[in-house]
Amino acid sequence: MADPTASTLPVTPPEPASPGYDASAITVLEGLEAVRKRPGMYIGSTGPRGLHHLVYEVVDNSVDEALAGYCDHIEVTLLADGGVRVADNGRGIPVGIVESEGKPAVEVVLTVLHAGGKFGGGGYAVSGGLHGVGVSVVNALSHRLRVEVRREGHVHSQDYRDGVPQAPLEVGEETDVTGTTVTFWPNDDIFETVDFDFETLRSRFQQYAFLNKGLQITLTDERPQHTGTEDEITDAVAAKTAHEADGITEAGNGTPARTVVYKYDGGLVDYVKHLSSTKKVELVHPEVIDFSAEDTERRISVEIAMQWTTAYSESVHTYANTISTTEGGTHEEGFRAALTTLINKYAREKNILKEKEDNLTGDDVREGLTAVISVKLGEPQFEGQTKTKLGNTEARTFVQKVVGDQLADWLDAHPGEARDVIRKSIQASQARMAARKAREATRRKGLLESGGMPGKLKDCQSNDASESEIFIVEGDSAGGSAVRGRNPRTQAILPLRGKILNVERARLDRALGNAEVQALITAFGTGIGEDFDIAKLRYHKIVLMADADVDGQHITTLLLTLLFRYMPELITNGHVYLAQPPLYRIKWSNSPHDYVFSDRERDAVLAAGQAGGKRIPKENGIQRYKGLGEMDYHELWETTMDPDHRILLQVTLDDAAAADEIFSVLMGEDVESRRSFIQRNAKDVRFLDI
């Protein structure tokens, strides 16, 4: 039988281990006792997000090796038995004895929290992953783990069960290559699911490859393909899914490809090209602007790539030590400040912006801009455990100066393209003014009833936003059931009577002319665009409640597009939810009825019920709900609105760049990109309404 931890990683010439990365570089801070008791403190949750975090922590260690210049290939494999193997060709985790522990460094790294080459500064100048924290937590939360280190001329290996080494570190066969392979099997007693999502990992690893120029990352899925309905859907939707673009190589033979290889020699330039290509928009200037700078004394560097397009929304993504900073931070503040100041200064100097005209705002300047800002720091300061906002003050001043100097040089060297950029910004400014007039006209025309609320809103009695919820429903029929079934004290209902405008293809001023958009903005209370104020939010739960068919899902996507593009703070602050109405009611002759939410659950409940002696009447035993309006109000309350029994999915934004790409593909103009996306993801469809 083949060794499940064997790797096909290409052989690289032996690299002498760095004198700065040996056993003495491993610093120990504290023990590992609390991890199993409170896993959420270390990986965020025990749901799918936490499960995938395990893989990221191991891969982050390999990326640290790449950042240090010692690794150029990482191979991740989803094994058939549910395990994950991560192999790199870096220096290998040190195997010498850590004096304070009396154990090999690799064992300390795997069994002691906060033990790793990052702490103390001896091993890495720059580190993105928690390094040491991450891999020890992975060990603690896996029922089995195996580590192989190729270092100092031998293969060193050790096996663990539930975080405990099963034997001393074994010195095996000789080797002339270096690297580390970690294979782990998550503990299914701890995690809600141990089923890894290929697309989630694929998106993250493509991002890593973009951010680390020249690093090759291979993701392979060796798990058996799903069978039954999903395969039939796949065959129907995607006859051929082999896809090659932007450095991606996918191998497929009529079924979705399960291997991807990412390597981008252009780095961030390739990233910006990739992001712009998903939007089906014209480029304001043909070449991607890119520049970089480094301050070795302050241990900080920055890379920036940017390009203006004719899109109506900005697409600016920031990273610190390859970690996505979805909440921004000081590096983004520096970029924005320099960009706005510089564009206004240039526009004034060239007399493109007249003396009596107002300055362009940051939103004006960034409209249509696709940009990636990647900083690397010796001592990054992240706000919050999730590392989503950078706090280093030196990053702001450093990035601001670099952008101010180097982008100014580009503008001077490309006067024609610079004028096009400024004209685009002026058009955005004019649209912003038109949007403001549209809001004022809405108020003047009395489109809002007394109290300032839309007439169709059935508001709740409570004035406490923290306990108030608003359900956005499609049509008067469903709205009527929701109004009758709700708890009027805390639950408001806003029915939408027409299709909401697709804001992916329209500027904000046009969106504000849409009655449904107006109703949403007014009901939320926050305003939109430059007027947005999260403190004025009237409901801390915004629940999108649509039919479980294609039209319902389309409306949900339109709503999410509006929120993502113009009110992203509602998502990042955790206020947006998706209701999960049942798809079927199973009526039993001799038992209370069951509500189920998918074809698969229907089949399972039927099989279990009939095996237990339950009987289905000959007529109307199984009712499929095609819409919310088909439910009685008490059914809607019982299944979808009652806080004690309902299922709500919270909309989160873990990866802003991936979300940006998906919205551009699904809601933009590019039909081919949309078809390709559907083909690649058809296997994940649980229910298809044709």
Image (spheres, rainbow, N blue to C red):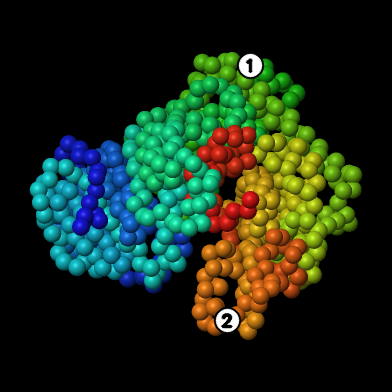
- CA gap, disc 1 and disc 2: 81 Å
| Marking on residue 350 | 1
Q: Which three-letter amino acid code belongs to the residue tagged 1?
A: Lys
- The residue that disc 2 covers is 614
Q: Which mark is residue 25?
A: none
Identify the residue at image location x=85%, y=46%. 443
Q: In what quadrant of the picture does the N terminus appear?
A: bottom left
Q: Is residue 482 left or right of residue 368?
A: right
The image position of residue 297, as x and y in percent, is 33, 36
Locate residue 467 relative to residue 137 in the image: left or right.
right
Camera-side residue of 176 and 337:
176
Nearest to the observer: residue 636 or residue 286 = 636
**Residue 227 seen in the figure:** yes
Q: Is residue 482 above or below residue 117?
A: below
- Front-most of residues 431 and 244: 244
Left or right position of 33 against 394: left
Query: Please, is residue 151 above or below residue 288 in the view?
Result: below
Residue 158, image x, y percentages = 19, 60
Tell which tag, 1 or 2, sits nearer the viewer.
2
Could you tell me which residue is drawn at 27 percent across and 45 percent down? 88
Per the image, label 2 sits on a secondary structure element best described as: loop
- Rendered location of residue 399, percent (x, y): 47, 35
Count all numbered tags in the image, as a single digit.
2
State the residue at coordinates (72%, 38%): 508
Mark 2 and mark 1 in contact (Cβ < 8 Å)? no
**Mark 1 Cα within 10 Å, few/some/many (few <14, many 20+)?**
few
> Is 240 on the left or on the right of 471, as rendered?
left
Residue 381: tell me if it is visible.
no
Badge 1 or badge 2: first in the primary sequence: 1
- Residue 330 position in % (x across, y down): 50, 43
Instruction: Give the quadrant of residue 673.
Output: top right
